[in-house]
Amino acid sequence: MFIFGVCGCCGALRPRYKRLVDNIFPEDPEDGLVKANMEKLTFYALSAPEKLDRIGAYLSERLSRDVARHRYGYVCIAMEALDQLLMACHCQSINLFVESFLKMVRKLLESDKPSLQILGTNSFVKFANIEEDTPSYHRSYDFFVSRFSEMCHSSYEDPDIRTKIRMAGIKGLQGVVRKTVNDELQANIWDPQHMDKIVPSLLFNLQSGERTESRSPSPLQASEKEKESPVELTERCFRELLGRAAYGNIKNAITPVLMHLDNHSLWEGKTFAVRCFKIIMYSIQSQHSHLVIQQLLGHLDANSKNSATVRAGIVEVLLEAAAIAASGSVGELYVHTHIHTYIHKTALADIFHFGVNWCFDYSLFVYAGPTVLEVFNTLLRQLRLSVDYELTGSYDGSTNIGTKIIKAHEERQLQEAVIRTIGSFANTLPTYQRSEVMLFIMGKIPVPGVHLALPSTGSGHEGTRMIQVMLLKSLVQVTAGFQTTNMLTALPSSFLEPLLSFSLTEDPEVRLLVLQILLSLIDRHDNRPKFTNISIISDISVLKLKVDKCSRQDNLFMKKHGQQLYRHIYLGCKEHSSGRQHYETLFALLGLLSVELANEEVVVDLIRLALALQDLALSTDEALPIFNRCAVHALAAAYLNLICQLTTVPAFCQHIHEVIEVRQKESPYLLPEDVFIDNPKLPSSLEKVEGDVLFLQSKITEVLGGSGYNTDRLATPYVPQYTDEDRLSKRKSIGETISLQVEVESRNSPEKEERTPAEEITFETLKNAIVDSVGMEEQERERRRQVVEKFQKAPFEEIAAHCGARATLLQSKLNQIFEITIRPPPSPSGTISSGYGQTQSRSVPIYEMKFPDLCVY
């Protein structure tokens, strides 16, 4: 016992590692670390690595004692010694030493002294930059994540010290990420429990510099002063965190961002939210961009009943994200979508036949994210909900006390933002994908009487109209910049016919949107801006129009749909509610047809159409207002002036220019320069429009016939092909045309089976038909109303019986046809005697007849 007591009292008999540790501490802490003795300690640690854990434990013991005694000078020396030992030693025993080191760092971070917290953080950052040779199975960084996150939210009174503490917290989080993100043996830093602390802490510091735009996207280009800025440091740390995120970690990294913006009402300002997601989109790997978009879409759906400003903020962020991702993964996403469809249509055994690469690709396609139509479906759903909210004034369709009050102007801003976002997404698509989206949106446009699933709150006709307008505006955005070489495949009948049918509504806004969509679809050489204003141009070469030879596909397109386009242009000019914008757009449409899709036959039809418009303006039967009649005259003059110069037939140009000169002198109100202005000077009537101020069809036919054009077709006046859709009175909406289909069906019903005898047509009959035309039209309208009312209000059983009767009628007619095709056998035995001495044919089906062998081959 005596010997052990003597050993404990004599310093010379103490263990060597303790003596070496004690020797690095000077008598006066202000003198700093004794470097010579530190070198001896380092050499000893390298020579005897098994002692490293004891050195660490002893240094930890001394540091704890010095912290308790407030001897902070010695604390700094101990931490400096630990840092140097960490940098020098990489042996297998380093793990035990690291435990002691982290224990000391934790001791400093738990202190209430800012200087000690910063000291501990700096040591941890140095440790985080060391690449360890041996893995650690039991090390935990939970405390450091929590403590550094807490330091990021420091509210210390002194602003300078508060800034230093926050920057230390940011650096500490950066160190934790670097140390753990690539080590599979460490606790997963991407777990929600960690991300929910790290990401909000970074956003909190980033938010403090919300008004300061990021000046340097690359940290390497920042000056030393900027590196000391908490905002710049936070942004670099945030970028590094996102840049290290793998495919499966994107969701855990983005979810806290969405929650932070929700909790602090940062969507409404838009600026900070947009800035955050710009950092995210530029930092993550490009092939993961669609995951961010998918989460934003889901978050938008989750906030469907939130305020319009919040939803508008999310939509604005989506707009920016789509623009950034346009050149990267969003395009890849759409490719993935189609190959994913192909995979579902192909046997998996055939896919696996190609080997491991196909298997890997298949895993990518399975997790490819939202499909194209899913993106647009979400945005269109939000557009529909916004219209519903605007009309009802509440988010739940009720007016109970406590429901949120909806501001109409905020909903309108949201709708415009959604429409812009739809256009932004559409711009990332190839032509064939954009055609699919156009068809998808067209199918969503409600038609009253057909789409019964309108907003459930009973917004009625106005709600349907607003949704029609919004979806057509979306189509305008989608078709902007649309380019295709084959109009037939890009614009199938399933899209073009419903679109053109909307141009027959009485709503002028709907008609104008339809015309704008047609302009975008037809314009393939950016000629549209050159037809913005209607005017008489003496030399169209100044327009620098781009005219290519019409391709075979274009010829087929015009052969199939040309008459439809002419008809809708003609009927658009007849509408009383058409204004200046409508006529300017119609002129642009005529001009684009002439330079984009015109062959010789199309040119002839367009000239006939222009002359028919002149006749329309001269007619008093349509009761068009004076402005509309003058506008149609001016439109026909401007277009004939254009087409005559495109055909380059001198005699044709001369006739057109002569008429225009006469109009300039005698009737300037028939030219666009005097009609399409803010305050047009119009006459009180147009009774004396005749003679030299009119374009003559006979003269045009004569001059063009000499140049090889079809004179027979030119001499035939254009008459639009009226259909049941516009044969009767005007429609208040396209939905009313559904009644015409019901009317056609009613004519074929069993009640109408008996035909009336042919009526003898005399002069008196024709006279009565002319006199009673108005009354007949009223009767027709009333009968049509009754038919529609019957189908709307009749019980289901009655309608089913009506349809069953039609089926019975059809079956009876088929039976009659089958009986006619049945013939008696050619043999004499085919006749049998009846009981009254009469002969009766025995009916034998053809397939049972016996034919001679010579007749069968």
Image: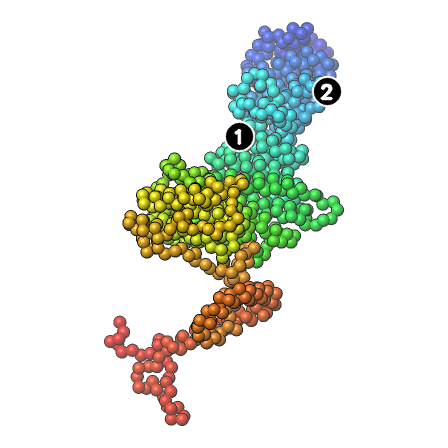
The chosen color scheme is rainbow
Report the residue at 52% width, 67% height from top.
772
How far across and down, in percent of the image, does residue 376 sit? 53, 45
Q: Nearer the viewer, residue 321 or 616?
A: 616
Give, as a three-letter code, the residue at label 2: Glu
Q: Earlier in the sequence, mark 2 or mark 1?
A: 2
What is the CA distance from the residue labelled 2 to the residue labelled 1? Answer: 34 Å
In terms of depth relative to the viewer, which is nearer, 187 or 17?
187
Checking the image for residue 283, the label placed there is 1
Asked if residue 728 lies left or right of residue 268, the reply is left
Q: Position of residue 377 (x, y in %)?
A: 54, 46
Note whether residue 536 is visible: yes
Q: Please tell me in which quadrant of the rendered image residue 409 appears.
A: top right
> At x 55% / y 23%, what residue is drawn?
215
Q: Amino acid at mark 1?
A: Ser
Q: Residues within 10 Å of mark 1 (few under 14, many from 20)?
A: many
Instruction: In the rendered structure, find residue 157 and report the number of the disc placed on it.
Output: 2
Q: Identify the image quadrant of residue 279.
A: top right
Which image quarter is the C terminus in?
bottom left
Percent coordinates x, y for residue 201 in the rendering = 64, 28
Q: Residue furthest bottom?
A: 836
